[in-house]
Image (cartoon, rainbow, N blue to C red):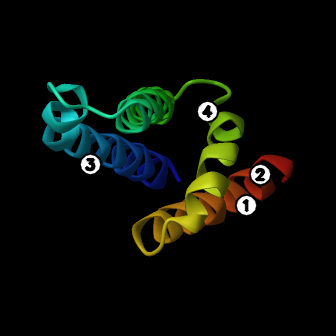
Amino acid sequence: MDKHRVIIGWLFASIAMLIAVFVAFTWKKAFGGDGIPHDQAVIKYAVAVAVLFCAVALTLILNYRHAAWICVPFSVAILIYFPIGTALGAYYLWYFRKFVYKRKE
């Protein structure tokens, strides 16, 4: 089961990296000379989400004690982002179900 935990951790980190690429490509447009406040708010939100996903990824990769419970809300939230978020969220929820039943035995 540790193999799946590490894989999911790196997948969460890759989601954060994808968000970072989005921010890199849109930063100049949002914060340039004719930037719109709405675009700036979207970029700030994206940076905050990327930081949270990095933190969640590190809890999984470094085997933090409460990582399994911390990641549940994130995986439920990304289920709506079809197809990548749906696959990653479902993969984590599958792992979490196996993790919880393994601990009960």
- Residue 63 picture location, percent across and down: 51, 29
Residue depicted at x 36% and y 38%: 39
Which one is closest to the eye, mark 2 or mark 4?
A: 4
Q: Nearer the viewer, residue 55 or 100?
A: 55
Q: Quick one: SS at disc 3? A: helix
- Asked whether, in this view, residue 12 is left or right of residue 35, the answer is right
Mark with earlier residue (1, 3):
3
Marks 1 & 2, CB-CB < 8 Å contact: yes
Q: Which mark is residue 67?
A: 4
Between the residue at mark 1 and the residue at mark 3, the CA separation in whole angstroms equals 27 Å
Residue depicted at x 25% and y 38%: 23
Amino acid tagged 3: Leu
- Asked whether, in this view, residue 63 is left or right of residue 96, the answer is left
Which one is closest to the eye, mark 1 or mark 3?
A: 3
Mark with earlier residue (2, 4):
4
Amino acid tagged 4: Ala
In the picture of the structure, the residue carrying the numbered disc 2 is 100
Q: Quick one: SS at disc 1? A: helix
Between the residue at mark 2 and the residue at mark 3, the CA separation in whole angstroms equals 30 Å
Q: Label 1 neighbourhood size at 10 Å, few (<14), some (14-19), many (20+)?
A: few
Between the residue at mark 1 and the residue at mark 2, the CA separation in whole angstroms equals 5 Å
Which one is closest to the eye, mark 3 or mark 4?
A: 3
Between the residue at mark 2 and the residue at mark 4, the CA separation in whole angstroms equals 12 Å
Q: Note whether 86 is above or below 27 in the view shown.
A: below
Marks 1 & 4, CB-CB < 8 Å contact: no
In the picture of the structure, the residue carrying the numbered disc 3 is 18
Residue depicted at x 43% and y 37%: 38
Residue depicted at x 14% and y 25%: 33
Q: Nearer the viewer, residue 38 or 96?
A: 38
In the picture of the structure, the residue carrying the numbered disc 1 is 97
Query: How many numbered tags mark residues here?
Result: 4
